[in-house]
Amino acid sequence: AMMGKGNYNHFMQKEIFEQPAVIGDTLHAFINPATRTIKLPEMPFSFDDVSRLTIVACGTSFYAGMVAKHWIERYAGLGVDVDIASEFRYRRPPLPKGGVALFISQSGETLDTLAALRYAKSKGQKIVSIVNVAESTIARESDAVLLTYAGPEIGVASTKAFTTQLTVLACLAVTIGRDNGTLSKDEEAAIVNALTELPKHAAEVLHHDDAIRELAINIADARDVLYIGRGLGYPIAMEGALKLKEISYIHAEGYAAGEMKHGPIALIDQSVPIIVIAPSDELFEKTASNMQEAAARGGRVIFLSDAQGLAKLGDIASATVELPKVADFVAPILYTIPVQMLAYHVAVHKGTDVDQPRNLAKSVTVE
Ligand code: AGP
């Protein structure tokens, strides 16, 4: 059936605004609200027997894998290798005996990801996939499938698929950590609470739409834009940069904030906007000092943080976006939304074809 845009101007805009609902739908599938515990579908193996996990994906789905690596290593004590499918498949890396490989794909049809899956299978790995299309090829070839309940995603730039992938991956990380004893019942309950509040917090972030549209006007004529973050904010910086590149055609780079001084800081002058993703978490002071270094070189800093972070350093920035204060664990899901909105409004301001950007296909089924 033809899907409509409803009251929205673009599918991407509609899909950004659907996020509170589809994150909620995805949580609903995996969380028991009464017991505040997570329950994933049965899998034909146990993560307890796994010594290392391999995650493979492309593009935005790869950035979801980067967030998952952080979560699974930190909260479940399981080492994770995460790789881009087109690199993984031709490198043909050795894989652990009895290992598990996880493939993340909105469409479930991305050729490189599928080829990587088939390689992992040929090396005896159990295959888990996270897809948005239940009948897709990747789902059919997997031993276990975790679905995102994003609904059809039409815009070429992935938005709600990413935040629902993160939602599923959060549930997976907690499950692995609980089952292997790394996470206590109380820690699980605290994360479940934070996840349960996400739809409400995501809706609050969407209220900044007008302010972000204003901000976008100042970015639309930039030649380069830098996005920086640390820890869980680093993959979100990468994702923000990819969104901007895809739909606004402005060159953008996502960087680990601590890596700036090893090269990219040379790019900074008054013409370069720097988007700083810095919730007031344990790495805040570190990211903040990188932000100060950028500002001292004349960079136009756009600072995404919560009230606590903004109170400390908001005056250094040329613009700020205040996000709700949330548990560190869920912050990457929330901080994705303003970077999507920013890319969207820059693209609209420039007049590009937001839903069908040049040279790109929604699902990349060729090499
Ligand atoms: C994201 O905005 C992109 N259009 C692209 O990077 C996409 O995420 C990638 O092609 C992977 O697609 P998949 O999730 O359907 O496998």
Image (tube, helix red, strand yellow):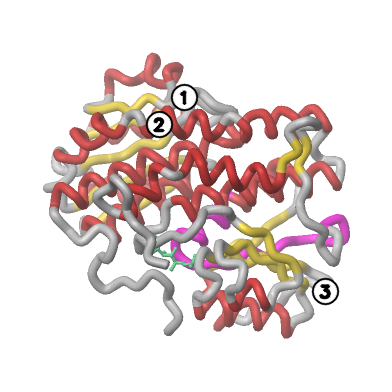
Which residues make up the magenta segment?
47-67
The percent position of residue 98, horizontal first and vertical second, equals 83, 71
Figure disc tally: 3
Find disc 2 in the rendering and name its residue.
Answer: 205
Q: Indicate left or right for 240 with 46 as reference.
A: left
Q: Which mark is residue 97?
A: 3
Q: Which mark is residue 18?
A: none
Q: Indicate left or right for 293 with 348 as reference.
A: right
Sort mark 1 into few (<14), some (14-19) or many (20+) by Cα contacts within 10 Å: some
Instruction: Out of 134 and 63, give the one closest to the viewer.
Output: 134
The percent position of residue 225, horizontal first and vertical second, equals 25, 48
Q: Indicate left or right for 288 with 222 as reference.
A: right
Kind of residue indicated by mark 3: Lys
Say whether disc 2 or disc 1 marks the residue closer to the N-terminus: 2
Q: Is residue 213 above or below residue 347?
A: above
Kind of residue indicated by mark 1: Pro
- Contact, CB < 8 Å: mark 2 with mark 1? yes
Say whether disc 3 or disc 1 marks the residue closer to the N-terminus: 3
